[in-house]
Amino acid sequence: MGFRTIRGTRDILPDESYEWEFVENQIRAWFRRFNYREIQTPAFEETTLFARGIGQLTDIVSKEMYTFEDRGGTSLTLKPEMTASVIRAFIQHHLGSSAPLTKLFYISPMFRQERPQAGRLRQFHQFGAEALGSAHPEIDAEVILLATSIYASFGLEKTVLKLTSVGCEKCRPGYKKILQEALRSVVDRLTADSQRRVDENPMRVLDSKEPQDRAATANVPLVKDHLCPECSDHFRELQSLLTKTGVAFEIDGRLVRGLDYYTKTAFELVSGDLGSQDALAGGGRYDLLAQELGGSPAPGIGFAAGIERLLVVLEKRSLFRGEAPHATVFVATLNGEAREDAFRLLQELRQSGISAEMDFHRRSLKAQMREAGRQRADAVVLLGGDEWKTGLVALRDMRNGEQRQIPKEELADSLLRMIG
RNA sequence: GUGACUGUAGUUCAGUUGGUUAGAACGCCAGGUUGUGGCCCUGGAGGUCGAGGGUUCGAGUCCCUCCAGUCACCCCA
């Protein structure tokens, strides 16, 4: 059968790699405008970093990680998400001690061993940002604006921003008890999965997609209505900031993110064009995570976004505006005697900044022209024949078919005029 | 991890109730008079019909197992 990409992984072939380049460039430009600086971390970390950071009970840690032992017997894991790694680096390199606010972004592959599906791969790519050091809602608003600005700049104005507050260590325990009580009164009407969660992770019951669960929990209390004064103020101020900057959002009290570290703000950007995996980006505040990972306390907020999913939506809406790269000048020869000169000219063109190509099969002129056309070259330079002996080359504009003879020395100027 | 559907040239697909050398379109290659692309015409290359096993005189067509893909659940980017 031969070798294949393993399940859930993909090759990014030339026909689409330029789309990735275009998308990444635009994303980077936005991070720069918001003054976030890039961070790269290794592909793998100690397994315990993720177990502690993301939460032992989460699906990611309990069943989706690519974990292996190195030769020394240390358990390592391919990063399933970026936040834990970023915080680790933040602590390890004391990034917080040289500035009151640390704003970081990343673009990186991630690994999760899930069943592949539309918009869900085992190796996928995320871009995202983390802002560490401020507990105020202004930075929450900035992070959200950063995400929405990126999507808007791709023409995706109609994505929906879902927003909520999941409370903090002060208000959540009390709410959980209230929720559990409410859930127990309807437990027999829940699906088996949800029944199990009532004790383990009651908040997850709220975002089940099962109609049965939705119906049973229709009147159950939501966190956003049981916040402590501090969380409540924070949430209200954040909404005010978003409204002031013209960001549309929907309060979704059932929004629960799958990672344990979130406190206060949680948000998600969804698109109707994605099928079941509809989240383009998700994020939230994590004020306890730095401590949890052994650092001094540092409040933080961030988001992560899927590049593959962004590309799916851009494709679906025909919003992709990049242009496929191709060689602009094709150097052809009328006969074999000019071949070496053609090769030299090819190099000269490239050195002067023009992307140039030639035929490497010693083929007929017809075949060379066909090749130039296939590659959508803007111009063809023809070397050889009688005029070659008198110092002339033929220059053909492939876009309109016009062709003329010019002295060799004028080639560079004529070419530049032609291809702009 | 659970379920449904699907697997025939590089790609998108035909392939009649099982019956000779498995087809088309597009793409690729070469020609259509000496040295010229796109359109058109002609020809060519390219398939162990996902893999393995079974039923049958005979399997791309039927059965089983596995693998892969797609979609949904779960979860999330």
Image: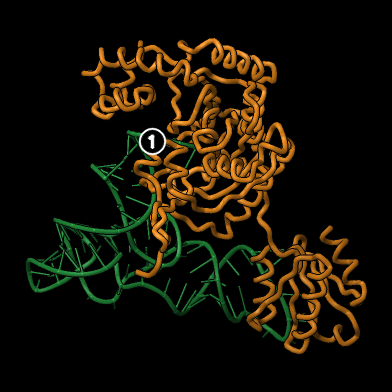
Chain painted green: B
Tell me the kind of residue under disc 1.
Thr
Residue at 49% over, 28% down: A262
Q: Label 1: how many residues lie within 10 Å, few (<14), some (14-19) or many (20+)? A: some
Spot occupied by residue A255 in the image (x, y as percentages of width and height): 45, 24
Q: Along the horizontal axis of the image, is B53 left or right of A137?
A: left
Tell which of B44 and A41 is nearer to you: A41
Q: Quadrant of the C terminus of chain A?
A: bottom right
Q: Determine whether A345 is above or below A133 in the image.
A: below
Chain painted orange: A
Q: Along the horizontal axis of the image, is A322 left or right of A53?
A: right
Spot occupied by residue A150 in the image (x, y as percentages of width and height): 65, 36
Query: Would residue A197 be seen by someone viewing this image from the given angle?
Result: yes
Spot occupied by residue A194 in the image (x, y as percentages of width and height): 29, 26
Q: Secondary structure at mark 1?
A: loop
Residue at 26% over, 15% down: A184
Residue at 67% over, 20% down: A246
Q: Determine whether A376 is above or below B34 in the image.
A: above
Q: Quadrant of the N terminus of chain A?
A: bottom left
Q: Along the horizontal axis of the image, is B32 left or right of A331?
A: left
Looking at the image, the residue that sits furthest to the bottom is A337
Question: Which quarter of the picture shows residue A159?
Answer: top right
Query: Would residue A23 be seen by someone viewing this image from the given angle?
Result: no
Residue pointed to by mark 1: A58
Question: Which quarter of the picture shows residue B50?
Answer: bottom left
Residue at 57% over, 34% down: A303
Q: Using the image, name the chain to which the residue with label 1 belongs.
A: A
